[in-house]
Amino acid sequence: MKALKIEGAIDTPEIYFDPATNIFSISGISHPENAKEFYNLILNWLDEFYEESKGDEPSKIIVDFNFKYINSASYKYLREVMKRISNFRNNGINVEVIWNYHEEDEDLLNEGMVLFELPEINLPYRCIPYS
């Protein structure tokens, strides 16, 4: 399966989901003009990854987020992305989430904590501040 690679732009984050390393990262600013269209690319890729991973040896995925800003429409779709990823556990895949945030951005820290504590997601996560 090919990696999903989307270059970041002024209003869209950089996406790099690499099935060879099992590191899935999203970083930058997320307030695309059409959040549904942008995030559906990710959701479709994740669905394909899920199907292709069935029957494989159990493995581990690291999901690495480093948002500078995320608007409410993007956050809604990020919840869908995380629901998909949490389903990977059904295929025996372990998931670890890293939520990077600027040490002075408590709002972004809280958004990550709320996201990963949702009952339909509930994945192990670490919040890592940077300066």
Image (spheres, grey):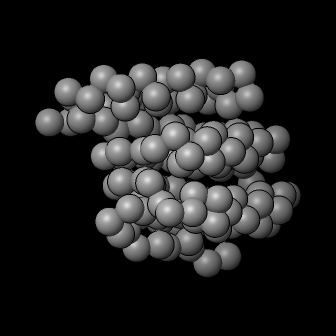
Q: Does 68 appear above or below 113?
A: below
- The total of numbered circles placed on residues is 0
Give percent across and percent down for residue 82. Answer: 64, 42
Left-right relation of 101 to 25: left
Give percent across and percent down for residue 114. Answer: 53, 23
Left-right relation of 92 to 34: right
- Whether residue 117 is visible: yes
For residue 36, what is the image quadrant?
bottom right
Q: Residue furthest bottom?
A: 2
Which residue is located at x 53 percent, y 48 percent?
74
Camera-nearest residue between 1 and 5: 5
Left-right relation of 74 to 82: left
Which residue is located at x 56 percent, y 29 percent?
115
Give percent across and percent down for residue 26. Answer: 45, 55
Q: Does 65 appear above or below 12?
A: above
Left-right relation of 130 to 62: left
For residue 44, what is the image quadrant?
bottom right
Which residue is located at x 77 percent, y 42 percent?
87
Give percent across and percent down for residue 12. Answer: 42, 62
Q: Quadrant of the C terminus?
A: top left
- Whether residue 129 is visible: no
Q: Does 3 appear above or below 33?
A: below
Which residue is located at x 37 percent, y 68 percent?
8
Q: Quadrant of the N terminus?
A: bottom right
Q: Residue furthest front?
A: 33
Camera-nearest residue between 39 and 32: 32
